[in-house]
Image: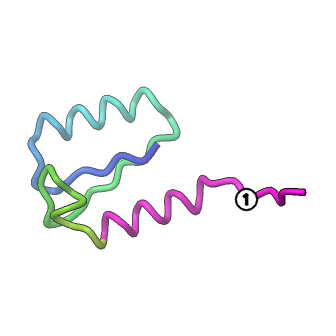
Amino acid sequence: MLLLIGQYDYTENKKAMHRLAALCPEASIQLLPEAGHFTVMESPKPFMKHLQDFLEKNSSPSTPQH
């Protein structure tokens, strides 16, 4: 589980993310600098980098179709 949160997001949202991460041991919280609540719009390049890294790390290799 990838949890992305903006540096300037509301404190309550940050606390909620940490509570959620505590329930899911494999969760990863990433703080996006210069972003508030709408991380994908406010910090698109770091957002996409974290998402791409997460997907590459957690996607299973393709199985050839016969």
User: Badge 1 local density, few (<14 within 10 Å), some, or many (20+)?
Assistant: few
Measuring 42% from the left and 47% from the top, which residue is drawn there? 2
Measuring 45% from the left and 41% from the top, which residue is drawn there? 27
User: Please, which residue is most extreme toward the front here?
Assistant: 66
**Dot 1 lies on which element?**
loop
Number of dots carrying numbers: 1
| Camera-side residue of 25 and 36 | 36
Q: Is residue 57 magenta?
A: yes
Q: Is residue 25 magenta?
A: no
Q: Is residue 32 left or right of residue 24?
A: left
- Residue 22: image x %, image y %? 39, 30
User: Please, which residue is most extreme toward the top here?
Assistant: 23
Q: Range of the magenta residues?
A: 46-66
| Camera-side residue of 25 and 50 | 50
- Residue 51: image x %, image y %? 42, 60
Measuring 53% from the left and 58% from the top, which residue is drawn there? 55
Measuring 12% from the left and 55% from the top, which residue is drawn there? 36
Q: Which residue is mark 1?
A: 61
* Amino acid type, residue under disc 1 in the picture: Pro
Q: Main secondary structure of the magenta part?
A: helix
The answer to whether residue 13 is above or below residue 60 is above
